[in-house]
Image (cartoon, grey):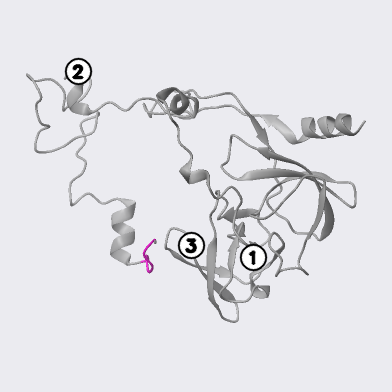
Amino acid sequence: MYNFLINKVKKQLIVGFSNRAGKNFFGRKTIFTQSGGLKFKLRLIDFKRNFVSNNLLLLIEKDLNRTALVGLICSNNGLFSYILLSSGNYKENSTFIYGFSNYNKIGSSSFLNSIPTGNIVHHIEYIPTKSCKLSRAAGVSSFLISRDANYSFLKMNSGWLLKLSNYCICISGYVSNENHYITRINKAGNKRKLGFRPTVRGIAKNPCDHPHGGGEGRGSPPKAQKTPWGKLTKVPTKITKNFYLKKKKFKIFKKN
């Protein structure tokens, strides 16, 4: 009876996912290094975490759509949902509390103005009352540097400094599955299952397929490097997003 109830709940929280990697709105292929991959289901995860409850952790699963571990919980009011698990000693059929009154406990949600400065947080809202958008990958966390009357200043994992409202929801600790970055792919077939196709150099193609193609032997690309569509690329004067951000000097910290 217990397993039957869990399977029935999971059918309502798991939906189909259409993989359109590398294709645009019309279904035409525009990115040649993305395609295919394994078929998988998408778990509907509670990214708001805006209520206090006593929960029972029923299952710990690995979702193919994300790197962190997800858990199926049942709250004391009878609601089932998936959540992103924080790093800790989680065990199935164990009880835990997350809410605004337990901000010092790892895995509990609270406002940024309730977290002491110097702590690490994850699963952060970018705009108050919206779902959490920041620091959701495996092993990622953000560092709470300082706070004023209305805003909190966070150092992100990438090294950027963000100014967010004090009423944004966050979770103490860092995301689970912190050893994800050391996993080995081992073979090319596993890379294809993740949705990546082989990347071919331009000088290895024919002249009808790329501006760098053709020639006799191992030729070098021309002085002005181009994209497959003939536009200039990799030139110092090319204005890109990274060029604009470096010019504005938004990046204050270097990534360790």
Evaluate if marks 2 and 3 touch, with contact meaning CB atoms under 8 Å apart. no
In depth, the one of 114 and 167 nearer the eye is 114
Give me the residue at 70% from left, 31% from top.
Answer: 15
Instruction: Determine the CA span between mark 2 and mark 3.
Output: 44 Å
Which quarter of the figure is the N terminus placed in?
top right
Q: Point out which mark residue 168 bears.
A: 1
Q: Secondary structure at mark 2?
A: loop
Which quarter of the figure is the C terminus placed in?
bottom left
Q: Quadrant of residue 152?
A: bottom right
Q: Position of residue 222 (x, y in %)?
A: 9, 33
Tell me the mark number nearer the camera, choosing from 1 and 3: 3
Q: Position of residue 82 (x, y in %)?
A: 73, 44
Of the numbered discs 2 and 3, the one sitting upstream in the chain is 3
Q: Point out which mark residue 208 bears.
A: 2
Q: Secondary structure at mark 3?
A: loop
Q: Residues within 10 Å of mark 3 (few under 14, many from 20)?
A: many
Q: Which residues are magenta?
A: 250-255
Instruction: Determine the CA span between mark 1 and mark 3.
Output: 15 Å
Q: Point out which mark residue 23 bears.
A: none
- Give the amino acid type for the residue marked by disc 1 in the picture: Cys
Give me the residue at 21% from left, 41% from top.
Answer: 233
Q: Point out which mark residue 156 bears.
A: 3
Side of 47 relative to 92 (left or right): left
Of the numbered discs 1 and 2, the one sitting upstream in the chain is 1
Q: Is residue 160 above or below residue 232?
A: below
Q: Position of residue 110 (x, y in %)?
A: 70, 66
- Give the amino acid type for the residue marked by disc 2 in the picture: Cys
What secondary structure characterizes most of the magenta part?
A: loop
Give me the residue at 43% from left, 63% from top.
Answer: 160
Q: Residues within 10 Å of mark 2 (few under 14, many from 20)?
A: few
